[in-house]
Amino acid sequence: MNDFTLLPRHARQALELHLRTMPAVVLTGARQTGKSTLARMLTDPPRRFLTLDDLDVLDLARRDPEALTTYPEPVTIDEVQREPRLLLAIKQAIDRQRRPGRFLLTGSANLLLMQRVSESLAGRASYLTLWPMTRREQEGLGRCGLWEELWHLDDRDWPERLHQELDRPADWRLLARRGGFPVPAVHLQQPEQRAIWFEGYVHTYLERDLQQLSTITALPDFRRLMQAATLRLGQLLNQSELGRDVALPQPTVHRYLNLLETSFLLIRLPAYAVSRTKRLMKMPKLYWGDVGLALHLAGLPEPTGAHLENLILLDLLCWRDTRIERPEILYWRTRSGEEVDLVIELKGRLLPIEIKARDRVRLQDARGLQAFRAEYSEAARSGLLLHTGSRIEWLTPDVLAAPWWTVC
């Protein structure tokens, strides 16, 4: 299947539920993740579709924003971040007539993090994030990985469920090169075509989208920082060290990273600690919003284990951000060097996940998972050790090794 406009998305069911509940729903995510396509799929009830990429509509939003809020039918307003003052008119319209699904707003920037946005529609809107397409979405299955099923299954039942997926192996390196943006992931088949698309994406982001968020005059410096960030996937985010490497002052690095995060291109993965205050004090790990774009920016000939971690993290974020009760996705590291790549925290329970980009795993690969379970024995579930091989086996009584593609 190569018509990505027909591929179902995991977020659709959650989006429809939010529209049946709230007068406004804000669907955000990086540009080109498929927000507009998903919004256009919602035809029951019929919706009027407006986009601020249309200069006439943008001009009207600036001159008379109330004119875009008085239609009798439900309205979808695309790229709403281009005119933040429109949100005040939407707030006033909701306060006059509050009914579910009245406004669907999409934007390629996180409105809650934008400095120019003073109106958050608190109490009137819910927020959903559309991440790049997961592997299963690209295959037409319209879902993320098996996280929900595994969470509700007893740990001892995991192998039986994962064995049902063994006949659907996948090449993680190819998935990393494609990324999850619908056009390069599904529609473009040749590496050269994807390289052209990614370069065009970067230019559009730097020359247009970024300027809508903040005035950046030194675009070569910004691109150099982007490249340096993509070369540090899975590493602790030390802004001072990053600044020294790219010859930029720390305040500038801080500002640029915040803009990348606002654009959903940068992901900061927080550290797990029992105290939530300590989580904020520990350095986050750095990941990217699309693995294919990260590979392009880094200029690496082959993806690394950090890119596999990034792929699995994005699959988890797709699952997390469509749940009503959202789990925390974290990492764990001790001063002595023990580490677990990912930790899911939900309802007081913890699921530790270690990721190895190799076909065969050994007992020593489970040391971090065992250390984590020993530290948090009352809350921790069995550990998952995801690898690139084809065997499902208990390495220890409390660590299950399984191919990454049986889960994601």
Image (cartoon, rainbow, N blue to C red):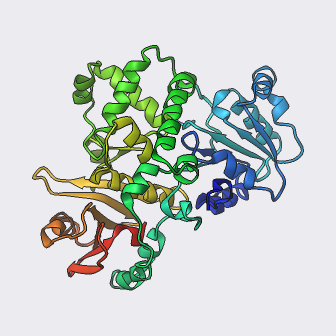
Question: Among all residues in the image, which is located at the extreme right?
Answer: 72
* 205 and 327: which is toward the camera: 205
Determine whether, in the image, residue 402 is placed left or right of residue 68: left
Q: Is residue 324 visible?
A: no
When asked about the image quadrant of residue 61, the answer is top right
Q: Residue at x 48, y 33 (%)?
A: 199
Of 342 and 175, nearer the camera is 175
Name the spot of residue 49 as percent of width and height, x first: 79, 42
User: How far from the left and from the top, in percent, is residue 394?
Assistant: 24, 80
Q: Is residue 225 left or right of residue 197?
A: left
**The N terminus lies in which quarter of the figure?**
bottom right
Describe residue 108's horizontal placement relative to residue 20 as left or right: left
Q: Is residue 80 left or right of residue 93?
A: left
Residue in view at x 62 percent, y 57 percent: 2
Expressed as whole percent of the image width and height from the top left, the position of residue 5 reads 67, 54
Image coordinates for residue 166, horizontal then vertical, percent: 40, 78
Work out whether 269 lies above or below 143: above
**Is residue 110 placed above or below 335 in the rendered structure?**
above
Above or below: residue 21 compared with residue 102:
below
Q: Nearer the viewer, residue 185 or 399?
A: 185
